[in-house]
Amino acid sequence: MPGKLLHNLKKMSRVAGGGNTQTAQAMVALYGIIVEAEVDPADWITAEIVKTAENTYRDVQIAFANEVALICEALGADVWKVRELVRKSPGREMLLPGAGVGGHCIPKDPWLLASAVRDLDVPVRLIPAARAINTFMPVHILNLVKSHLPELKGKKILILGYAYLQDSDDDRNAPSQVLVQALEAAGAVPVIHDPFINAYKGTVLEKAQDCEVAVLMTAHSEYQQLDLAGIASVLRNPILIDGRNVITPQAAQQAGLTLVRLGDSSREAD
């Protein structure tokens, strides 16, 4: 986890896998020099499944939130309100829907877990379905752009955020990469802003000049303080597609900006 590596190394629990009990216990003792949290001994297979299952669990939970977001859009509801109310039920911790899942681990580990039983006649269905949903989300963002701007050829599109994780410069498997490639394939010209990546630094207003619409892909803290009125004044079409629920409908309305939120096609958003 970028920005949290040293903290997590010391504070998060570990599973130490070994080929036999003595080896596993030796690994527990070795890790205990650094790790302040609990370290559990296990055999190799258990340890590897724990690692991949932990990331796969998160992927599946995000996919559920994303699919509910797509359902809400289709039915004229607001997934953010739905999520708020679902979470009032005990044990129902619905995760955040969003414009896609990136990073080094989550896009990879579900396939590692599923592929281990590829030749063992185990009907693995949920994991591939979750991967398909999360992989589709940047494509869905592209579809939202097309719904407001059917002709993309030669049009500049402002992309806010290129890193996969907020307030970091880590762009490994970033959903923005998928969106940028899809826009380029459609003949559009992506203009990228990211305050944490040197190649994409600059002011948002300068980047927004001559762009048709803006698409927010990463929930960087800086984007919570955007000059929305300024953005609305320089965009050719004052439309912001928010894939991370950073901008409130009220703030967008006051700035004269049409806000399109992922998972929200309710009347309240109009």
Image (cartoon, helix red, strand yellow):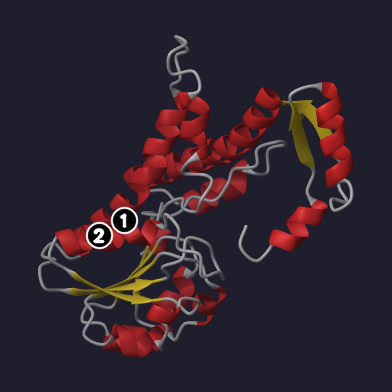
Name the secondary structure under disc 2.
helix
Q: Residue at x 40, y 30 (%)?
A: 129
What residue does disc 2 label? 181
Q: Is residue 221 left or right of residue 38?
A: left
Seen from this angle, which residue lies furthest top?
121
3D distance between C-alphas at marks 2 and 1: 5 Å
Q: Is residue 5 left or right of residue 2?
A: right
Question: Relative to the observer, which residue lies in front, 137 or 14?
Answer: 14
Label 1 environment density (alpha carbons within 10 Å; few <14, some 14–19, many ≥20): some
- Give the vertical position of 57 relative to 42 (above or below): below
Indicate the position of residue 214 as horizontal and vertical percent values. 31, 73
- In the rendered structure, find residue 178 and report the number of the disc placed on it: 1
For the C terminus, the image quarter is: bottom left
| Amino acid at circle 2 | Gln
Indicate the position of residue 79 as horizontal and vertical percent values. 47, 49
Q: Residue at x 42, y 37 (%)?
A: 131
Which corner quadrant of the image does residue 189 belong to?
bottom left
Question: Relative to the observer, which residue lies in front, 143 or 110?
Answer: 110
